[in-house]
Image (spheres, helix red, strand yellow):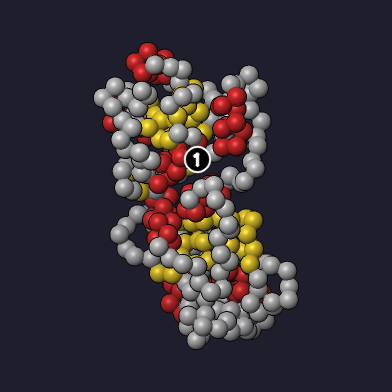
Amino acid sequence: MNVDASGEPFRFVVLGAQTGGELVPGQITAAGNRRHARILRYLRSGSWVIRDPFTRGRDALDPGAEPAVPRGYRTDGTWIWPLALEYYYEHHGVAPPADLLDLMARSGHYSRRVRADRCGQAHQALLARAPGPFEPAAPMQFRLPPDVFDFLLTVGWVPGREIAVDPALDPQRRAVLAEFGDLAFPAYGYARDWRVTGFLTRPKGEPSDPALIAAAQRRLGGPLLPIGSVPQWAAEIVLHPEAGIGTVCADPEHERFLGRDIDEALTSLIRGAAVDPALRTAAGWVR
């Protein structure tokens, strides 16, 4: 069953909230409950909201061990739970909330498939929430806004990522695409300035519509170097060596300045918010 985007508020799992702020081990164990494996299957089959494969936190029930509690969040379209729940459930028998257990039982212990736009709503819902006391904190980094950093991790980017790109590309595109090329970003709802829509970064820098690029160069002034596309806008994401990064397309409504560099451009696209709405003229964003 698919879960469509809706205005329904999410419910959050906060570890320890039902037990006086403490983790209680041994509530549901593999030896004592035949539902144990089915509950774990449900938790692990939830759709990703944030996937951080690198951050680990201390185990509050085994504080002398090396950090092992994973950081990340999943959803079934109704609940959002931290990967810490999966960890403490599997390793210590800490039970999920009773209401979530009831939902699992009603669904046959199979998590529903959640559409990208509902996952996006879950991601936005997490922004206003501080991590619970038994959830690993977000890693310290100063390059990107935390929500953008988490979203990039979730789609497969990692700090220091470097893939093979065409050595004949210009140095600016080569640097951008070596780090961010060949990633696909899902569409997931509305934000401040426009719909957060899916986009692609292309590892070879080849435009999906060369004629569109050529026409935009004649109109705006070039060179415009393609690095990706926004299919729903029928737009190319291009890098101008002096003006920065933006989109070009046949429809001026979707021709936007995205940022002075790739970090600002990705932030604009992921957040659905123009980094500087003033950088838009009747003739386009290249000035």
Residue at 48% from the left image edge and 78% from the top image edge: 97
Residue ranking furthest to the left: 282
Q: Quadrant of residue 164?
A: top right
* Quadrant in which the C terminus is drawn: top left
Q: Is residue 165 left or right of residue 105?
A: right
Q: Position of residue 163 (x, y in %)?
A: 65, 34
Residue type beneath disc 1: Asp
The residue furthest top is: 218
**In the foreground, 81 or 191:** 191
Residue 41 position within the rendered picture, expressed as x and y whole percent measured from the top left? 57, 66
Task: Where is residue 158? Give x, y as percent.
Answer: 61, 46
Q: Quadrant of residue 53?
A: bottom right
Nearest the viewer among 203 and 279 is 279
Query: What kind of element bears circle 1?
Result: helix
Which part of the image, by quadrant, shows the N terminus? bottom left
Residue 270 in sight here: yes
Q: Residues within 10 Å of mark 1 (few under 14, many from 20)?
A: some
| Relative to 189, residue 78 above or below | below
Q: Residue drawn at (47%, 72%), measured in percent from left and top? A: 13
x and y percentages locating residue 115 in the rendered image: 42, 52
Which one is in front, 162 or 241? Answer: 241
Whether residue 30 is visible here, answered yes or no, is no
Name the residue located 60 percent from the left edge and 31 percent from the top edge: 175
From this viewpoint, which residue is outermost toward the right? 65
Q: Is residue 208 left or right of residue 25?
A: left
In the drawing, does residue 72 fall left or right of residue 3?
Answer: right
Q: Quadrant of residue 267?
A: top left
Residue of label 1? 263
Residue at (30, 59) in percent of width and height: 7
